Amino acid sequence: MPDRSALGDPGRRRLLAALAAGVFSLPAGRLSAQGGGLPAPLPPGRSIHELRGTVLVNGRAASRQTAVVGGDVIETGEASRVIFAVGKDAFLLRASGRLETRGEGVTVRVLRLVTGKLLSVFGSESRRVETPVASIGIRGTGLYVESDPALTYVCTCYGTADIAAIADPLSGETVVSEHHDAPRYVLSSGAAGTRIRLAPVFNHTDQELALIEALVGRTPPFEVNGGGRGNRYGG
């Protein structure tokens, strides 16, 4: 089991430098459907619910009519974002992101978040989310990931995730979460078995989870409006 104590000197300096530079400090912003309600599931043949700014699919400018399928590469520019669904999985990719997918048709088996910030909800099939630093195996899970060369942030919003540091087979953990219970940093360097560390919850909302779940006809497994669970978690 990785050491969950305070970061050692090299890792702590790297993490603090990243945080000071604002790597994980951009505000999420609130999302809501027009009129305060949730959207209906996307009709057959439609993938994109919303796009703002510069959004590319396979290097070409996307529109609301662009179909996204397994094997596509999705990119967002500065001050941009896209909300989309593929099969029973739905996603919110924030600004300055690059998401590479592997699969075919409406099935995406692997998502590689090269850079950026990705909120995802998944159906019951097994999936894997990768960054340059971490590998995350999931099923039926809500997951928020921020990818930077120095470290990856992972919040298992609900469900189960098997989190591993790619360069350190001794750093691995299975997280079971009901409601943002166990966010983690995964570091790119550090002593063997110590690259997964405790983290706070920030930069994603229950409303956002409810919105993207609605695109695939589901609801999150907790009450969004009430009990203080409609918050935006911020650093």
Image (cartoon, grey):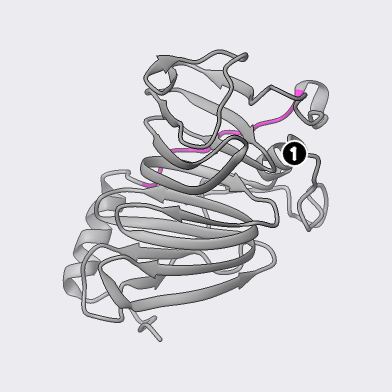
Instruction: Write down the region rendered in magenta.
Output: 24-33
Above or below, 99 against 230 in this view is above
Residue pictured at 55% horizontal, 31% vertical: 69
Label 1, residues with CA under 10 Å away: few <14, some 14-19, many ≥20: many
Magenta residue check for 199: no
Quarter of the image that includes the N terminus: bottom left
Residue annotated with mark 1: 216
Residue pictured at 25% horizontal, 67% vertical: 167
Residue farthest along the bottom direction in this orientation = 1
Write down the quadrant of residue 61 in the picture: top left
Write down the quadrant of residue 78 in the picture: top left
Above or below, 71 against 11 in this view is above
Horizontal side of residue 147 vs 104, given as left or right: left
Q: Amino acid at mark 1?
A: Val
> Does the magenta stretch mainly form a helix, a strand or a loop?
loop
Horizontal side of residue 91 vs 58, given as left or right: right
